[in-house]
Image (cartoon, grey):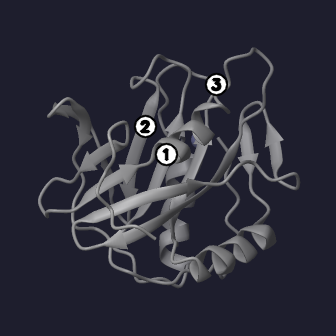
Amino acid sequence: MAATTPTPGDFHLPTDDVSQTLVFTRDALAMMLQHRQLGSTEPESGGMLFAQIEPGWITVRVATPPHRHDHRLRHAYEPDLKQQQREIHRRFKEGLHFIGEWHTHPEARPQPSGTDLHSMARCFATSRHSLRAFVMVILGTAKWPDGLWVSLHRENSITRLHPGKSAGLIRWLGAGWFTPFTASRRSPNPKKK
Ligand SMILES: [Zn+2]
């Protein structure tokens, strides 16, 4: 895999205190954006985020699409955990690390629900990994980038990442939250709005 020199159009999320930047590639963003709940009846969608981890950079190269066994409702989304575990192993062989999840909300400027927050904290606490935080992305319906929520989660803390402008690119601040790791789920992690 090529070294992570961000290409124009990639989306950057520099972090707040340590020099590590979270980057979403165009492909990963496009996958998430195409599932926004823009219609009045579309169900929530969601998937996993897989990143290449290097000193200074965490590059989210893959956002997986909804899986046919996911449980999807207008205001709820629950992934197929067995399928997720298989995906984690498969992507790890490609050098990509599971760092979090994305899902949609049928609201303009998405806010995480109590279930979202609880789910991320539990995921962080009960998964086997060496991450300092998990990433949660929520896609709402407002115009880019207002309809985007990105946050870092640990067992007892949440940090929202905010966009800023730098060198013509939208940049968001994150921190030295990530080190290479392997992750696997040990307990069910239902995710509902
Ligand atoms: Zn949610």
| Residue nearest the viewer, comparing 52 with 116 | 52
Ligand 1: quadrant of the figure:
top right
Q: Is residue 40 above or below residue 125?
A: above
Q: On the image, which quarter does residue 17 sit in?
A: bottom left
Tell which circle, 1 or 2, labels the residue nearer the N-terminal end.
Answer: 1
**Image position of 128 (left or right of 53):** right
Tell me which amino acid carries mark 2: Trp
Tell me which amino acid carries mark 3: Pro
The answer to whether one can see residue 110 in this image is yes
Label 2 Cα neighbours within 10 Å, binned few <14 / some 14-19 / many ≥20: many
Helix, strand or loop under label 3 = loop
Q: Residue at x 49, y 45 (%)?
A: 137
Name the residue beneath numbered marker 3: 106
Q: Identify the mark at residue 137; answer none if there is no mark.
A: 1
**Image position of 179 (left or right of 116):** left
Q: Residue furthest front?
A: 2
Helix, strand or loop under label 2 = strand
Helix, strand or loop under label 1 = strand
Tell which circle, 3 or 2, labels the residue nearer the N-terminal end.
Answer: 3
Q: Identify the mark at residue 178; answer none if there is no mark.
A: none
- State how far apart marks 3 and 1 are (Cα): 14 Å
Q: On the image, which quarter does residue 76 sit in?
A: top right
The answer to whether one can see residue 187 in this image is no
Label 3 Cα neighbours within 10 Å, binned few <14 / some 14-19 / many ≥20: many
Name the residue beneath numbered marker 2: 149
